[in-house]
Image (cartoon, rainbow, N blue to C red):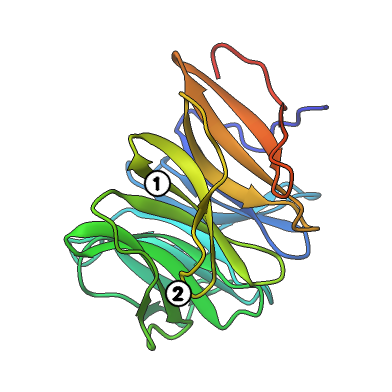
Amino acid sequence: GNLRNLTNHPASEYHPTWSPDGRWMAYVSGQHGKGEIYVMDIEKQERRRLTNHPASDTEPAWSPDGRAIAFVSYRTGNRDIYKMDVNGGNLQQLTDIGVNTKPAWSPDGRWIAFSSNRAANVDIYVMDSDGKELKRLTNQPQSESEPAWSPDGKQIAFSTTLLGNTDIYIMNADGQNVHRLTHHLAEDGFPAWSPDGQSIVFGTEFEENKDIYIINVAVRTRHRLTRHPDS
């Protein structure tokens, strides 16, 4: 496909995420010597800084209604999840125990799934969008991370080192019915559902090559989307 460069700054810019209407992109810029969250109007190429704090702010995640952004910040000396309006106002801290990362909104906007080591192991939890009604979904000695909700909100894909390599698994939104999706010697992570819920796109790393694949959830057929040895 056609590649389009959206940012062009000497500093690193990463963690891009689209707004639900596709008009805006939130991302992290390191141009201030640490991570700060920006949003960009894709068509106009106009950008606006949302966070301005001595600590690093990363991992932005849009709410389904496009009105809020959850993100991870070190501003208390630990990685916690916060929520703010899309103009940077109305800041709210949602977690305060352990290291908390990878916030992901449920399609109805009620829940936020995330990874946390609050019980020693890195597991996946959900909380409501105000940081209450905490529920633990996984409980394994290995690491479970990078939760991604299916479009219908009934399932969550995630990455785990349960069997040694990092693979993609799927579970029901209540943590039940866990099953493995990828079986590969590579390290598979960063799952993202297709809008129709039939496929999952994910990143894979094998022998230092990093590429993007897509896998059909029902029949488990996978296809390679990129082929870049220096990705």
153 horizontally vs 42: left or right: left
Q: Look at discs 1 and 2 and give the one toward the viewer.
A: 1
Give neighbour class at mark 1: few <14, some 14-19, many 20+ (Cα, 10 Å). many
Residue 221 position by quadrant: top right
Q: Quadrant of the N terminus?
A: top right
Give neighbour class at mark 2: few <14, some 14-19, many 20+ (Cα, 10 Å). many
Task: Identify which amino acid the numbered label 1 is placed on.
Answer: Thr
Work out whether residue 186 can be spotted. Answer: yes
Looking at the rendered structure, the secondary structure element under dot 2 is strand
Disc 2 designates what residue? 83
Percent coordinates x, y for residue 230 in the rendering: 54, 13
Pick the residue in front: 52 or 18: 18
123 horizontally vs 88: left or right: left
85 horizontally vs 5: left or right: left
Disc 1 designates what residue? 160
Q: Residue at x 37, y 61 (%)?
A: 72
Q: Quadrant of the C terminus?
A: top right
Q: Residue at x 65, y 80 (%)?
A: 108
